[in-house]
Amino acid sequence: MTALANQHKAINLSQGFPDFDGPDWLKDAARQAVIDGPNQYAPSHGLPVLRQAIADTTRRLYGLDYDVDTEITVYSGGTEAIFSTLTGLLDPGDEVILLEPFYDSYPACVAMAGAVARYVPLRWPNFEFDQIELAAAFNARTKVLVLNTPNNPSGKVFSRSEMEVIAELVRRHDVYVMTDEVYEHITFDGAQHVPFATLPGMRERTITVSSTAKTFSMTGWKIGYTLGPPALSKAARSAHQFVTFCTSTPLQVAMAEAIRRLEEYKPVLDAEYRERRDVLLNVLQEVGFEVRPPRGTYFVLADFRRFGFEDDVAFCKYLTTEVGVAAIPPSAFYFHKEEGRHLVRFAFCKNVATLRAAGERLQTLRARAAAAG
Ligand code: PMP
């Protein structure tokens, strides 16, 4: 979509990274860290100063205690954390439960581990799972369930009661959970992010993946991490050692400062994302998309059938080439493609001016809705 967007000079709301940078004080911290060093390899599982900052902030925010040496691991982004965790935990033939729509790295990592994915849909418009369908996905070979909350691409934030259903099933079937919480700090309308590991009995069977990429708008720094009990962390570390070994040393120093200052910085993040979300959401509703306001992440899924289209790829091509706004066809996030065929994903991690300019272009869709009746 980005190639097509460039060709047609479309405003790109497809890719999920900000068109702005994180705070200047964080850039200053990185500059200073490069000057002062260390600039050589970090310890494989992360610099102590960063792991300590993660441990302290996790305890302050969620009341969860993780051991700095054996339970916290730094990776080259959430992406590598996901790969190393799944590779470390899975053996060929194991089964993994994925809720769809999913972040597209999960099925790829499951395949690379030689394991088999079972898909359970979260259905439009509320992205709830059917408890019977979920229960039926478990069997004797199930080793891991992957949860992503707040959820890319749906914007769903799982409720505590939904997580309790999942917790009961993973307990009954003795399954591990990899929970991807990289959007934990981007929520709206008072939605409460509940870390899955805070549910009774879940800390011991859960690896939590998080990342500094979205929280601090520095996706290119690639600093992610996991929290998890020693045996699970050790399995993931054994993959990590031979994937990247470690991640950028001075940027870890700078991110340690960012994580320490999270609560001071968070109100700015909240206010800016609320405005960005509302600008895009209002336009989408105004021109005739059917949307469910996202409760978390910086994505929104919208139903485009009002404009007379049935297929997401065809609609996204039209949107890019004729309207001048690029978005993602979300069937890429589904195994059962038909579940997402009537939807389009917009990213609102963009400057308000970019979103307003996209909004102006989207106005041309009104005529299309009128023509389609
Ligand atoms: N998980 C989800 C759900 C994501 O959307 C992303 C980034 N698009 C990642 C993980 C990867 O995070 P990172 O950029 O830290 O590799």
Image (cartoon, grey):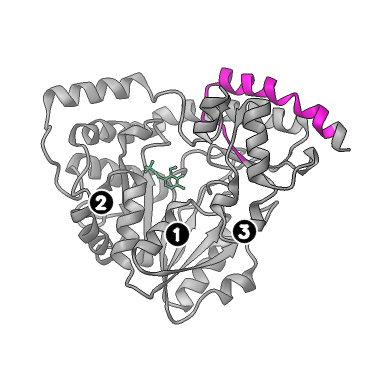
Q: Provide the residue designation for mark 2.
A: 73
Nearer to me, 273 or 117: 117
- Left or right: residue 306 versus residue 220 is right
| In the image, farthest residue toward the bottom | 140
Q: Residue furthest right?
A: 373
Residue ID at (68%, 22%): 361
Mark 3, residue position: 122
Q: Secondary structure at mark 2?
A: strand
Q: Which residue is mark 1?
A: 107
The 10 Å Cα crowd at callout 1, few under 14, some 14 to 19, many 20 or more, is many
Q: Against 71, is 343 above or below?
A: above
| Image: 130 above or below 327 | below
At label 1, the amino acid type is Pro
Q: CA distance from mark 3 to mark 2?
A: 30 Å
Residue 349 in the image: state x and y as whole percent: 51, 30
| Residue 3 in sight in this render | yes
Magenta residues span: 345-369
**Residue 227 image position (x, y, % from top left):** 32, 54
Magenta region, main secondary structure: helix
Check residue 358 for magenta coloring: yes
Closer mark to the observer between disc 1 and disc 3: 1
Measured Cα–Cα span from mark 1 to mark 3: 16 Å
Where residue 180 appears, as percent x and y from the top left, is 43, 52
Quadrant in which ligand 1 is drawn:
top left
Of callouts 1 and 2, the N-terminal one: 2
The answer as to whether callout 2 falls within 8 Å of ligand 1 is: no
Q: Secondary structure at mark 3?
A: loop
